Amino acid sequence: MNAFVARSLDEIRFWSRIMKEHSLFLRLGFRSEDTQLIQEANGFYSLFEQIEAKSHAFSAATAPEQIRAFNVEVHQAASHIWVFKRTVLGLILTCKLPGANNFPLLVDHVSREANYFRNRLSELNNGQLEPLADAIIDENVFFLKIMADHAKFIGHLLDPSERKLVDQAREFSHDFDQLLWQAQDLSSMRPQSQTQPLLSQFLDQNRVSVASLRDFKKTARDLIEACRVKSIIHPLLADHVYREAERFLAIIDMFENCLTGKTAANQNAWH
Ligand SMILES: [Fe+2]
Ligand SMILES: [Fe+2]
């Protein structure tokens, strides 16, 4: 099996669905008179829907050259949605969309995810191998911020009367802010901080908190789906942030396996 093909398809299958859903969330947050923005969001929805379908039509047996071309095509789509998201952020921050319902931090957040997706695709196509110890720190800095943001979104989109759940969300927000600072400290101590025991402990500590946030998101998702909790969270958004936590956990496990040398093959799979 070709690791480049498998890795590319895995990234595209996961992130194209995410990009498709971002288009839906952005659209839901626009006002009814923002017809141009709504149209653009719908356009991105179908674009990423097509990309997702295409990625499932390919398989690990597809020729690497074909995947390389597909990666370029998807990279372009990710760049375009990134520009759209940053444009929307600019409109919100200059108060051009009064009454629209997307938080600026949420729009910034989804643009960071588009940028991450785009970078993954160019790294795969360029065959740029980030050393394992750097990948561990960079990926964790990225995803810890994503998790900290999610906790804040949940806390702010739950009905204020859901006091217990809002408190829990706030605790997660604080926990992940602390973890993010720790990750940034480890990053600034590079390369001396990149020892096997320190990186391994870093992964262990992050895994515990991500697993617990993942469980909280799963509970929230089930409660929202069953209409047992008061909120303005779309059920698909609840599921979306749950899947992103699962993705982060899988990445942590893969790094741990690489660090301990359990699966040497996985090391190549990352790159
Ligand atoms: Fe997302
Ligand atoms: Fe996210």
Image (cartoon, rainbow, N blue to C red):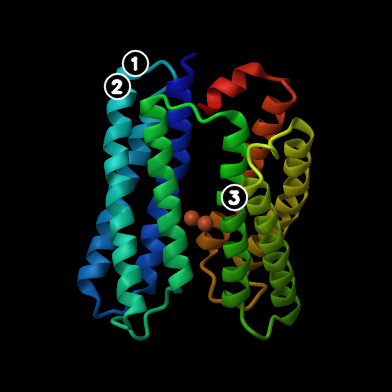
Where does the image place residue 270, in percent across and percent down from the top left? 54, 28
Q: Amino acid at mark 3?
A: Val
Quick check: 207 left or right of 34?
right
Quick check: 218 left or right of 71?
right
Residue highlighted by disc 2: 66
Q: Nearer the viewer, residue 70 or 158?
A: 70
Where does the image place residue 185, in percent across and percent down from the top left? 67, 52
Residue highlighted by disc 3: 141
**Dot 1, how many residues are within 10 Å of its Cα: few (below 14), some (14-19), or many (20+)?**
few
In the picture, residue 99 is in which quadrant?
bottom left
Q: Name the residue rendered at 47%, 67% in the picture.
A: 106
User: In this view of the protein, can residue 247 be seen by the observer?
Assistant: no
For marks 1 and 3, give the CA distance. 34 Å
Q: Amino acid at mark 2?
A: Gln
Label 1 beta carbon within 8 A of ligand 1 = no
Residue 143 against residue 158 in the figure, above or below: above
Label 2 beta carbon within 8 A of ligand 1 = no
Which disc number belongs to residue 63? 1
